[in-house]
Image (tube, rainbow, N blue to C red):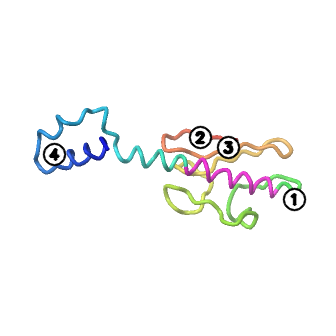
Amino acid sequence: MKRVVCIVLLAALALGAIPALAACGAKDITPPIQDIDLARDQAARSEIILVKMAISSYVATNGSLPPAATQQVMGALIDAWPANPWTNAPMAPGDKKGDIVYTPGAGTTFTLGVRLSDGTVYTAP
């Protein structure tokens, strides 16, 4: 409730009601973009689990790792290929937010992650 009041007061400030800022402490204000990025980060963490399941299915079917963690290679192994929460396009390897980070290892071992809003890579469990 306090956040809603602050947002209303900040809107009033934007319209010229300068005293509105005094009613909100700086610590009470979370930039909306930060909340959106946190939600997208969580969605990306969830979506990468589907890619991990597709890799496991590929290994079970072919006895080896897939050459790439892409929809073209493994899309048929799961019902719906996950979407990048920032672009809504199918998740794909890359260096941008929501992109897949896939590194094949020895035998059938691999590391799989997704790039988050702050540039770090979350590694799928």
What residue lies at 58% left-to-right and 60% top-to-bottom?
Answer: 83
Question: Which image quarter is the N terminus in?
Answer: top left
Q: Are marks 3 and 2 in contact (CB under 8 Å)?
A: no
Q: Amino acid at mark 2?
A: Val
- The chief SS type of the magenta part is helix
Q: CA distance from mark 3 to mark 2?
A: 9 Å
Q: Earlier in the sequence, mark 2 or mark 1?
A: 1
Q: Which residue was labeled with disc 4?
A: 13
Specify the label residue 95 is tagged with. Answer: none
Give me the residue at 13% from left, 51% from top: 15
Q: Write down the residue under mark 2.
A: 121
Magenta segment includes 77: no
The C terminus, quarter of image = top right
Dot 1: few (<14), some (14–19), or many (≥20) neighbours within 10 Å?
A: few
- Sequence-first disc among 4 and 2: 4
Q: Mark 3 against mark 2, which lies toward the viewer?
A: 3
Residue tagged by mark 1? 62
Q: Nearer the viewer, mark 4 or mark 2?
A: 4
Span shown in magenta? 43-58
Report helix, strand or loop for mark 1.
Answer: helix
